[in-house]
Amino acid sequence: MAKGHRSQIKRERNANKDTRPSARLSNARISAEKACFVLDAIRGKDARTALAIVTYNPRYGSALVAKVLKSAIANAENNNGMNADNLYVAACYANQGPTMKRIKPRAQGRAYRILKRTSHITVVLDER
């Protein structure tokens, strides 16, 4: 059973809300596993260093992560009034999104299923 009234539960949940600046790219056309290779490279780094890393990374996911990282930096400066030089990547992760299912015709009338995976990429910044 729930403890308290529904409004009381919501009030407690909102009190614990994370106020760090973040950005999220939903339904990115890359699998979460491939996006995590790029995210692992920037986790814990300064925001400017992380931006330099993803700019010169040859992987496809690095362009998507760069877009999210720039958005998170802009959110920190404009919404929270933080200095961009003091920011670092506190957390970054990619969750699995909806999977598009496609059919590929094969020999002798068979059909193989192709799974086109998507992901939700999130970058959370914090100030040092």
Image (cartoon, rainbow, N blue to C red):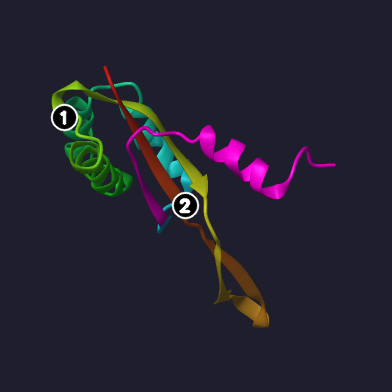
Is tag 1's residue or tag 2's residue first in the polypeptide sequence? Answer: 1
Q: Which mark is residue 13?
A: none
Q: Residue under circle 1?
A: 84
At x 61% / y 77%, what residue is drawn?
107
Q: Secondary structure at mark 2?
A: strand
Q: Position of residue 10 (x, y in %)?
A: 61, 45
Q: Compare residues 95 and 8 and report the one nearer the observer.
A: 8
At x 36% / y 38%, what residue is drawn?
123
Q: Compare residues 120 and 107 and report the one nearer the observer.
A: 120
Position of residue 50 relative to residue 35, above or below, is: above
Q: Position of residue 24 (x, y in %)?
A: 38, 48
- Position of residue 55 in the picture relative to residue 89 (left or right): left
Q: Which amino acid, mark 1?
A: Ala
Seen as rendered, the residue at the extreme bottom is 109
Residue 55 within the magenta-colored segment of the rendering: no
The residue segment tinted magenta is: 1-26
Image quadrant where one finds the N terminus? top right
Q: Nearer the viewer, mark 1 or mark 2?
A: 1
Q: Residue under circle 2?
A: 119
Position of residue 124 relative to residue 64, above or below, is: above
Q: Which amino acid, mark 2?
A: Ser
Q: Residues within 10 Å of mark 1 (few under 14, many from 20)?
A: some
Seen as rendered, the residue at the extreme right is 1
Q: Quadrant of residue 87?
A: top left
- Position of residue 112 in the picture relative to residue 65 (left or right): right
- Position of residue 102 in the picture relative to residue 62 (left or right): right
Q: Secondary structure at mark 1?
A: helix
Position of residue 127 relative to residue 116, above or below, is: above
At x 22% / y 38%, what residue is drawn?
73
Question: How many angstroms separate mark 1 from mark 2 (CA)?
Answer: 27 Å
Q: Position of residue 109 (x, y in %)?
A: 66, 83
